[in-house]
Amino acid sequence: MQDTSVKHSAGWTNFTIASFVIAAGMMGGGIFFMEAGFAAKGFYAMAAIMLVQSSITITKTLRDNEEAGKFINKVEDAKNERLLMDISRGDE
């Protein structure tokens, strides 16, 4: 069996974190400096927070489903390998 897990470099990880922080800062600044009432800014802020939260949740869910599929495949591969080994032992 092969281990096909993807390892991200520290540079890529830092880039994605920095991108998120910059985007969140720009969104927060845009809402703060928007020419609108406090209530409108509050609704925009709540929508932005929910969008970020749901993006993180869907990303984690999709990743977890992918990892679960890999685990199930590893279990199936191990069962098949054991079955083949049992069959080959019976031929001796």
Image: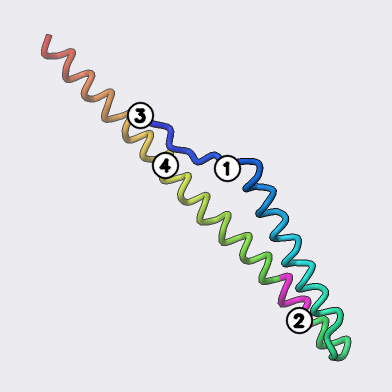
Left or right of residue 82, residue 90 in this image: left
Q: Is residue 83 left or right of residue 9?
A: left
In-front residue for pair 40/16: 16
Task: Indicate the amino acid at tag 1.
Answer: His
Dot 3 surroundings within 10 Å: few (below 14), some, or many (20 or more)? few
**Going by the image, does 69 lie left or right of 86?**
right
Outermost residue, bottom direction? Answer: 36
Number of callouts: 4
Q: Position of residue 70 (x, y in %)?
A: 42, 42
Q: Position of residue 87 (x, y in %)?
A: 17, 20
User: What is the distance, in whole Å, between disc 2 and disc 4 at their CAs?
Assistant: 39 Å
3D distance between C-alphas at marks 1 and 3: 21 Å
Q: Main secondary structure of the magenta part?
A: helix
Q: Which residues are magenta?
A: 43-49
Q: Earlier in the sequence, mark 1 or mark 3?
A: 3
**Marks 1 and 2, Cα distance to the nearest angstrom?**
33 Å
Instruction: Give the residue number, with chain letter if any, for mark 3.
Output: 1
Vertical placement of residue 7 versus 40, above or below: above
Give the residue at mark 4: 70
Q: In this image, 59 relative to 45: left or right?
A: left
The residue beneath circle 1 is 8
Badge 1 or badge 4: first in the primary sequence: 1
Q: Of discs 1 and 4, which sits in the foreground?
A: 1
Q: Nearer the viewer, mark 1 or mark 3?
A: 1
Q: Name the mark nearer the viewer: 1 or 2.
A: 1
